[in-house]
Amino acid sequence: MLETGAAFLRTPRRASREIEIEPARSRALLATNVLAGAAVFQIGVVIARIMMLGQGGIALGDLWFGVSFLVAALAMTQIERIGIEAFGRRRRWRITRQVSLAVCAHASVGWVVAGALVAGAMLLLAALPHDLRFLPSGGLLRGTRLAGLHVMPVLLGLSGFAGMLVFETLVYFGVRECRFANHAGVRESLEDSANREQPAT
């Protein structure tokens, strides 16, 4: 599965051509990637808290971050599946539930990237001096709602959005390459039919 994710990040178009429409494998791949993204994010939260507060260990409240990431990634993946299935029906593409699951499962390596980017943003924030963790109150921001705002929501928002763009981009390539795909059961039926129709020699 690591090789699959790396291939999709390196050459998404070529890797998308090799997607296999196998629901069981797709579910396992999706679960693995989303859990990996949540774990990377959770580790970043813990290390950042230690850097900022000087406290070791994992507080119960820290687990909320990883669980929230997990729920959000699964919810957005499901929304994406519904969206590409509806889009496929409008374009008369063969984007079935099995195909949408396979496409989104392979694209879910984007959630690992998102987890790493958000974790990196938190570690960067923790490494900054306290004064630099807030936007300036003067200059162009004077009198605006952004003046003096803590940079955490800005950094987390931008890094999370960048990770989501990776997921969306991989979904796009997957849909383009699999829009006329058949799932495994259909392929086997077609092959059986073709074999029966071939004349005996």
Image (spheres, rainbow, N blue to C red):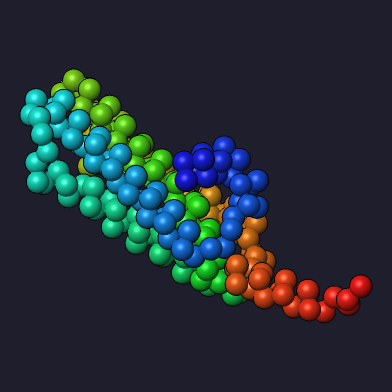
Left or right side of 18 for 4: left
What's the residue at 24%, 41% (across, down)? 42
124 relative position to 20: left or right: left
| Residue situated in front as seen by the camera: 118 or 100 | 100
When asked about the image quadrant of residue 92, the answer is bottom right
Is 109 on the left or on the right of 131, as rendered?
Answer: right
For the C terminus, the image quarter is bottom right
- Please provide percent x and percent y for residue 173: 60, 52
Compared across the picture, whether 86 is left or right of 49 comes to right
Residue 63 placement (x, y as % from top left): 16, 47
Residue at the limit of the structure toward the right, as seen here: 201
Residue at the far top: name it.
Answer: 129
Residue at 21% in and 37% down: 45
Count up the numbered dots: 0
Q: Nearer the viewer, residue 57 or 71?
A: 57
Residue 98 visible in the current orientation? yes
Q: Residue furthest front?
A: 201
Give me the residue at 82% from left, 79% from top: 197
Q: Residue 168, relative to residue 114: is it above or below?
A: below
Tell me residue 43's x, y (percent).
24, 36
What residue sits 21% from the left and 47% below the top? 65
**Residue 143 visible within the image:** no
Residue 75: give x, y in percent of width and height.
Answer: 34, 62
